[in-house]
Image (spheres, rainbow, N blue to C red):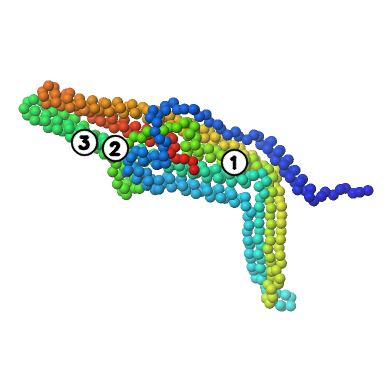
Amino acid sequence: MMGPAMSSPCSYPHRIIGILLASATLAGCALGPRPVPPAPTVPAQWNNPVANQGEWPSDDWWSAFDAPELERLITDAQSLNTDIAQAQARLVQADAQARIAGAALLPTVALQPGASTIRSLSPTGTLRRYSPLLGVASASYEIDLWGKLHDARRSAIANGQAARFSIAVVRLGVTSSVAATYFQLCAVQDKIADAKNDVLSATRILEGLRIQQQHGLVTGMQLAQQTALVAQFEAAIAPLEIQRTHLADALAILSGHTPEEIAITGGSLETVKIPHVESGLPADLLLRRPDVQEAERLLAAANANISVARKNFLPSIALTGTGGAQSVALASAVGAPAAIFNFGLSTLQPIFSGGRLRGSLDYANGRYAELAAGYARAVQQALGDTEDALATVSGEDIEMARRTQALAASRNAAEMARKGLEGGLTDTLPLLLAQQSLASAHSSYIDARLNRVLGAVALYKALGGGWQKP
């Protein structure tokens, strides 16, 4: 009779592979389906398209306003602003994490040299001294059979890409804040200049009324009313100057300076060029908005983390090996070195982990669901920001035209009231009302022009500020 057939050694790898594949199939069925990436709904066109088609924002979109001081402030902000510096530091951390994750795909090699001195005393009284020398190199390598280590690296790379998009988000926010604050400063300075002109004009009228009172042409009440108006105009200047100081200090901090380090001149909104911006198509925002790109990359990283969590249920295979030499040096002679070698292969199949693996998978799925909602929210916010900016630009164009007409009419009414009083055709009341109306028209016109300029800044920001994916 023949004994039982012995298995061939070459069949063991096939058996191991078969067992691993069976384990993978069973584990995959038990973990349920993978999450489906979200597909946000993007409209085909805007509700408020711009009437005057211009150019798509460039990388230096702020230069379209033709404000040299603003350009200098933005240049300082992009190199000195602390928020941007923090975002750049986060990018360094993310890149380091990607390198750490990538290191797991390579073998780990270590060298352990050692030397010691041993003394022994024999029964005959002979003293011997040993000097063992040991040099051992060890290496270990985890076989990425299921791609788990590649998934971990893919997650780290996606996080690094998200960090780069985050820098673009912060830079865009800082740049638009500098522009908006600078234009607010210009508007306040325009209001201060108008307020001082109003004081000067009202004071001249007051001096004329005093002369007329001396001749009995106007009453004391009429003189008192004009005096009160002059005081009101003068009182309006102080709050505007305080506001100017606050805005200048804010600009200094945004540009990376202390208020004492930089002198900001400001200017007039009348010298600021109002650009016309091309809005493109709604679908363009998915590629041009850095915050949308950041949200998408974070979602990709979360998807890779789910793969890692799922594959932690599968067996892992590790190769280990050590090699080296050992020699013993006596007091009078040195022995020949002895070689040391050791190789091993180990397979680990998770069986019971107290719920750790399932908890890690549930966490990864929950994190993915959170970031999927965040991605959808980023797309919605991008579309909403652009619609709001387009509506603002369209509406402010109309308001600015009406405010310009109202300012011209108020100036004409004030001039007619002044001539009517000088000619004795009217009393001081029409002139008093005309001065108040002109001051209000000045302020409203400046506000309208400021809102139109800020609308352009908001549209640049909503469209991604000209930033493009590298």
Tell me which residue sits at (21%, 28%) in the image.
411
Q: Where is residue 240 in the image (x, y as percent from the top left)?
A: 27, 37
Tell me which residue sits at (48%, 34%) in the image.
284
Q: Where is residue 156 in the image (x, y as percent from the top left)?
A: 56, 45
Q: Which residue in the protein does label 1 denote?
A: 304
Q: Which residue in the protein does label 3 denote?
A: 196
Q: For residue 337, which quarter of the picture? A: bottom right
Q: Where is residue 189 in the image (x, y as percent from the top left)?
A: 27, 38
Label 2 crowd (10 A; few <14 / some 14-19 / many >=20): few
For residue 379, side relative to residue 241 (left or right) = right
Q: Nearer the viewer, mark 1 or mark 2?
A: 2
Q: Position of residue 463 (x, y in %)?
A: 44, 35
The residue most toward the left is 215
Name which residue type carries label 3: Lys
For residue 306, side relative to residue 58 (left or right) = right
Tell me which residue sits at (71%, 61%) in the image.
341
Q: Which residue in the protein does label 2 denote?
A: 271
Q: Say whether marks 2 and 3 touch (CB < 8 Å).
A: no
**Label of residue 216 in the image:** none
Q: What element carries label 3?
A: helix
Give the CA separation, mark 1 to mark 2: 52 Å
Label 1 crowd (10 A; few <14 / some 14-19 / many >=20): many
Can residue 253 be spotted in the picture? no
Q: Which of marks 3 and 1 is nearer the N terminus?
A: 3
Tell me which residue sits at (53%, 37%) in the image.
296
Give the CA separation, mark 3 to mark 1: 64 Å
Q: Nearer the viewer, residue 95 or 325?
A: 95
